[in-house]
């Protein structure tokens, strides 16, 4: 794609689109989209419109201008990665260079949660009502590098969930070691104690996520 030719376009909430006129290019029948612009456009949508789960999100003033965001993004190792706002800072709702990072999909999925499940059990724990399981009815399982593993059976849900959290924390660390942004590993190491004791925002007892 050719170098950008800037044009000033303002939007109602003072976002400045000084991007190129054409955000896509067709080559041999295939349409190629500019990933830099569409990443910024996604941030604009999340912070300027009522998108479920992003109602209270904000964006730094510099990033309201596309060329500023683009200048930051080209310096990041973003290819084949996803932009995240709350791995570096748990619970963060603000998009800025200091709070955002590009991470692997695997890492992002480890902190992508869905709240409001009707299940009484925490993630990673399942109940087996077979008579032969009555002494230890709570089983633990999780996914580790695309492999589904079982972590034993336990008498109480609390014991089962503690086993899950510790195994999950070990796995999260192993994934963080592989991340290309050098800020990720220290941030994860700082979060591990809270993940292990179930107080991390993404790993509380009532949080349902990806096993």
Image (cartoon, rainbow, N blue to C red):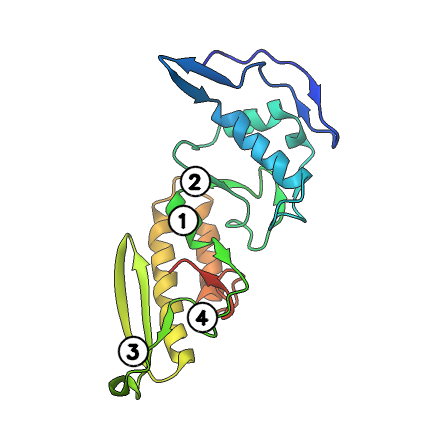
Q: Which residue is mark 2?
A: 181
Decide: few, some or many residues near mark 1? Use Cα within 10 Å; few <14, some 14-19, many ≥20.
Answer: many
Q: Are marks 1 and 2 in contact (CB under 8 Å)?
A: no
Decide which of tag 4 and tag 3 comes sooner along the chain.
Answer: 4
Quote the CA–CA distance across marks 4 and 2.
Answer: 31 Å
- In this view, the residue in front, 72 or 146, is 146
Please identify the quadrant where the N terminus is shown. Answer: top left
Q: Determine whether 24 is above or below 177 in the image.
A: above
Say which residue appears at 37% left-offset and 62% top-offset: 168
Decide which of tag 3 and tag 2 comes sooner along the chain.
Answer: 3
Decide: few, some or many residues near mark 2? Use Cα within 10 Å; few <14, some 14-19, many ≥20.
Answer: some
- In this view, the residue in front, 118 or 56, is 118
Quote the CA–CA distance across marks 3 and 2.
Answer: 37 Å
Q: Which residue is mark 4?
A: 122
Q: Determine whether 1 is above or below 184 in the image.
A: above
Which element carries disc 1, helix, strand or loop? Answer: helix
Decide: few, some or many residues near mark 4? Use Cα within 10 Å; few <14, some 14-19, many ≥20.
Answer: many
Q: Which residue is mark 3?
A: 153
Nearest to the eye among marks 4 and 2: give it. Answer: 4
Which element carries disc 4, helix, strand or loop? Answer: loop
Q: On residue 107, which mark appears?
A: 1
Q: Is residue 185 left or right of residue 132?
A: right
Q: On residue 19, which mark appears?
A: none
């Amino acid at each position: 794609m050719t170098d950008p030719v800037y044009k000033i376009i303002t939007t109602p909430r003072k976002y400045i689109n000084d991007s190129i006129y054409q955000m896509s290019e067709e080559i041999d029948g295939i349409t190629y989209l500019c990933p830099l612009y569409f990443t910024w456009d996604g941030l604009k949508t999340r912070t300027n419109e009522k998108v479920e789960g992003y109602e209270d999100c904000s964006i730094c003033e510099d990033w309201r201008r596309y060329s500023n965001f683009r200048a930051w993004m080209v310096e990041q190792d973003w290819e084949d990665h996803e932009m995240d706002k709350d791995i570096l800072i748990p619970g963060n709702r603000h998009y800025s260079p200091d709070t955002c990072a590009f991470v692997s999909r695997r890492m992002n999925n480890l902190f992508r949660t869905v709240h409001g499940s009707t299940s009484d059990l925490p993630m990673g724990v399942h109940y087996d009502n077979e008579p032969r399981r009555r002494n230890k009815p709570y089983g633990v399982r999780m996914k580790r590098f695309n492999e589904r593993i079982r972590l034993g059976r336990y008498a109480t849900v609390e014991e089962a969930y503690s086993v899950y959290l510790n195994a999950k924390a070990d796995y999260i660390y192993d994934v963080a070691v592989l991340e290309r942004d050098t800020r990720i590993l220290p941030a994860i190491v700082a979060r591990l104690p809270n993940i292990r004791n179930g107080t991390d925002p993404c790993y509380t007892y009532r949080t349902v996520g990806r096993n």
